[in-house]
Amino acid sequence: MPEGLYTLCVFSFLKFMATFSSLDAWLSHLETAHSIPIVMGLARINRVKELLGLTFPCPVFTVGGTNGKGSTCAMLEAILLASGYRVGVYTSPHLLKFNERARINGDTVNDDLLLQNFEAVEAARCSFDVPVSLTYFEFTTLAIMHLFATSAIDVVILEVGLGGRLDAVNIIDTDCAIITSIDVDHQEFLGDTREAIAIEKTGIFRIGKPAICGDPVPPETLIGEAKRIGADLWLFGRDFNYHGDKQQWNYVGRGMRRSALAYPALRGTNQLLNASAVLAALEAMRMVLPVSAQDIRLGLASVKLSGRFEVLPGSPSLVLDVAHNPHAAAVLSQNLDGMRYFPSTHAVFGAMADKDIKGVLHQLIHQVDHWYLCDLPILRAADTQHLETYLRAAGFVEDANHSVTHHASPEDAVSTALKLSGENDRIVIFGSFLTVAGVMRYQKLCHH
């Protein structure tokens, strides 16, 4: 739209527009402005996108998958930053502050920049005869995309929120898609089998564009959809792979090798799988975004990501992990096995009611001696009575060395766990992002 016409629209419909002076006020408004929090479909958001004239003049990576998306985005960002590119990254959800969802050149975006772009989206959606209703996620996704599109950025990384085909980030055609893993989660929106979920996730693939799959055992439907679409599918084990020992690892792609690489700074058994998918994506895009072996080494050494098998210093050991589905819980269990010996393991756990809670707990039931179940400040959360029912269904039995207690919040749960644990014990905080975020806030308060 010509700038003058857009300005006219803004003023013509100003009386219908919401406007707020703070980011918190905007977010509070958006949480209640749309009656349904999740609506699958791109028709409404595409109307506003077109009015905004939203396009990216730079390469775009879109990252989907059940687990590992955040780690993959973080490693890709770190390597590209080490290469000297100006990078925009959009991820969700956040842990402590909404601003975490948008980073430019490695820095979280400040409130003022976000407010400007919220107002641009509000003006656009209100310029129709009937204002377009957008969910919280759709509105904020558009605002951050608009920020990136109007900033001097060399490359954009977009993390899918839910699924792929009908997710808000899919309004942008990607130059390289990455699918990290495929497992059963969000069944009410995506289907209840890996095969059905794979079809939804391949919705981010594009004709003739690289499509990297880091899942070692991809459903046949993923391969079939990539072929049907005409995407350039890169499969782990066929088109790229990794080999390593305890000291270093090597990447082997279609036509490129990277040898003697240090392990990523992110902990966890699956991080080499994620890192190899990142290197495959960079190999596929090497003609437009060249990176050197040294850039890769620097990026992998410097990458940081909160709440993904994050071990905090001190005694007892605190382990933070946003594992909230059975696949992620199985990986967390493996990672806990790889740690040193602890006399007792305590767990703070809170989760959304729509998750496979029994499946999550089943993966960790033999790892944990003392459970601190917590309520979360959201209606979607499972209450602690339900959590205990799931815990017992997963096989938990109380005795002299095994206990379960109920707590009003993650902060209360971890406070009690710290009092009851020995200095050589460990406390694992996992489940919903809200569980981990509550403990992070508590830790910050304790250290001030």
Image (tube, rainbow, N blue to C red):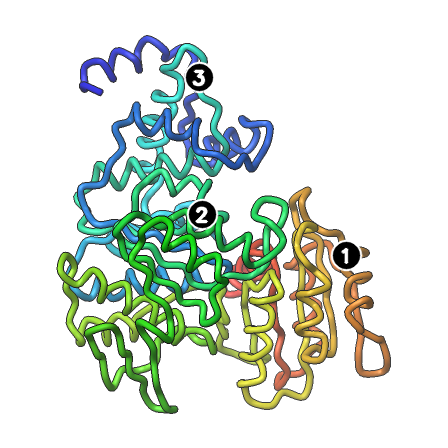
Query: In the rendered view, would you say 303 is above or below 338?
Result: above
| Tag in front: 1 or 2 | 2
Q: Position of residue 168 (x, y in %)?
A: 42, 39
Q: Position of residue 203 (x, y in %)?
A: 42, 47
Residue 242 visible somewhere in the drawing: yes
Which label number is shown at residue 131? 3
Q: Which residue in the protein does label 1 denote?
A: 384
Task: Check contact, mark 1 vs mark 3: CB within 8 A.
Answer: no
Q: How many numbered markers are drawn?
A: 3
Mark 1, other Cα within 10 Å: few <14 / some 14–19 / many ≥20 = many
Amino acid at the residue labelled 1 = Thr
Give the mark, 1 or 3, whose residue is nearer the N terminus: 3
Secondary structure at numbered mark 2: loop
Per the model, the C-alpha gap separating discs 1 and 2 is 32 Å
Per the model, the C-alpha gap separating discs 3 and 2 is 26 Å
Residue 108 visible somewhere in the drawing: no
Residue at horizontal 65 percent and vertical 66 percent from the top: 414
Residue at horizontal 44 percent and vertical 21 percent from the top: 132
Which label number is shown at residue 305? none
Amino acid at the residue labelled 3 = Pro
Q: Is residue 424 left or right of residue 397?
A: left
Query: Which of the pair 167/89 is nearer the observer?
Result: 167
Mark 3, other Cα within 10 Å: few <14 / some 14–19 / many ≥20 = some
Residue at horizontal 60 percent and vertical 69 percent from the top: 329
Query: In the rendered view, would you say 360 is above or below 110?
Result: below
Secondary structure at numbered mark 1: helix
Q: Quadrant of residue 255?
A: bottom left
Per the model, the C-alpha gap separating discs 1 and 3 is 41 Å
Which label number is shown at residue 164? 2
Give the mark, 3 or 2, whose residue is nearer the N terminus: 3
